[in-house]
Image (spheres, rainbow, N blue to C red):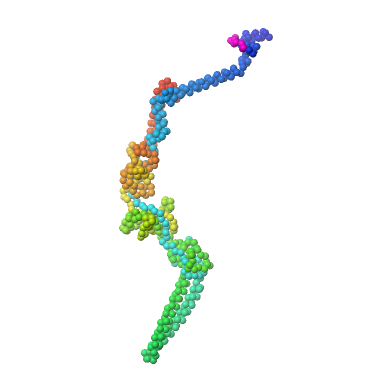
Amino acid sequence: MDEQQQHSETSRPTAPVSPAPASGGPDRPLHNRDKRDTPPAVVKSHRGRNIALIVAALAILGFVLWRWHPWGSPDGAAAPGASATHSGRSGRGGPGGMANMPQPVHVATATQGEMPVVLTALGTVTPLASVTVLPQLSGTLQDVYFKEGQMVRKGDLLAQIDPRPYQISLSNAEGTLARDEALLQTARLDLKRYQTLLSQDSIASQQVDTQASLVRQYEGTVKSDKANVDTFKLDLVYARITAPVSGRVGLRQVDPGNYVTPSLTNGIVVITQLQPISVIFTTSEDNLQQILEQAQSGTKLSVTAYDRSNTTSLEGGTLETLDNQIDTTTGTVKLRAIFQNNKNLLFPNQFVNTRLLVNTIKDAVIVPTSAVLNGSMGQFVYVVKPDNTVTVRPVKVGPVDGERTSIKSGLQVGERVVIDGSDRLKEGAKITIPADKPRGARGASGAAAAAASGVSGASAARPHHGKHAAQASQ
């Protein structure tokens, strides 16, 4: 056993002798221990030292990067090239930079053309005739000869009232007339005889005068009988209910078999004339003078009716007449326009938008309506200069026709105005037009080159950080 221990000690390298522990140490000295006998605490200390070295290396690397970056300089000031790059970034992203950047807008060119003077108003479709068909005598409604919604002409048979009571009354009146006519004939013959006897002085004149009065009495009776006959004949005509006007019938209000009277509340049916039809609309009394000038000269003013959305044209017509007085409560006057309504697009009591063409201005300066803005100084436009900047130009606006506006003064034909994107503009602001894309692309490349040169300047300003700059550029 002693020989083996001596052999192992001679084969191992000699380790430095460490001092013995104060107390409680092992029996064998440390230089006689094997690696397998190394305690776990020593291994953990080696791992901790490695981790500490890695953390220290990362801290040094971070410090170097912080020293190289422009905003990490010790004195708080960046290099000239870097500061230029930084200010360029803030100019693109900051609020102050947005005001200096060219704003993208859409523009249009002022043109010259004809501008119609149009008066727009809300109107109501009003039929020229709307008739409630009422029976003119009492009786039982036998038959109805129309269909609801049917187009009828004047004189067409609509319904039939039982005519038998009126036929009997007619026969009775004709009998009375025949009797009274016979009595009248007899009285006339007697009067002729009496007149002959009076000429012979055979009778008194009083008897002749009495007979003459009797003849006149019978004549009155016969005349009354003839009137009664005509009345009952007319009743037979009224028993046949016909259309008083041409138009469209509405919904039937009374069914056959009902007893109808002239005092019927809703009548039998309502007929509305659709062709032609009128539209009644109002306009301000300020427009009355120019309308009267055109109307008195014999010019037929054109009127167009549009639907409620004011986008679809329904029918075209002409101005027929004006009312004879102005409404003092609203300061407006009523006008009536006539439309042929061949396609029946105008319906009675329908609300429509009317456009009355009063006049046409020749050689007017015309711009899109969106180009005209309102401000504290009044109406104005943004005019585009040749250097792609804008200037505020006050204008006086003339007649407006939907998306087109005429300019009385302040703008010339051929000048360009901003029609979209004007909310970000001010006097002298720079603009870009979407059509000029190549120019904008070249400008962007120049800005990128300037930024790259700024970064290169920042790198050159710090020679001791050239290595990091080269690595960053690679």
User: What residue is at 66 percent from the left and 9 percent from the top?
Assistant: 4
Question: Which quarter of the picture shows residue 131?
Answer: bottom left
- Residue 168 visible, this angle: yes
Q: Is residue 192 above or below residue 457?
A: below
Residue 160, x across and y down, in percent = 49, 68
Question: Which quarter of the picture shows residue 467?
Answer: top left
Residue 335, x across and y down, in percent = 37, 57
- Indicate the quadrant containing the N terminus: top left, top right, bottom left or bottom right: top right
Q: Is residue 361 above or below residue 177?
A: above
- Magenta stretch holds residue 18: yes
In the picture, measured across the screen, residue 58 lies left or right of residue 391, that is: right
Majority secondary structure of magenta residues? loop
In the picture, measured across the screen, residue 52 lies left or right of residue 393, that is: right
Q: Is residue 291 above or below residue 426?
A: below
- Indicate the quadrant containing the C terminus: top left, top right, bottom left or bottom right: top left
Q: Is residue 229 above or below residue 195?
A: above
User: What residue is at 41 percent from the left and 82 percent from the top?
Assistant: 216
What segment carries the magenta color? 13-22
User: What residue is at 44 percent from the left and 23 percent from the top?
Assistant: 67
User: What residue is at 49 percent from the left and 70 percent from the top?
Assistant: 138
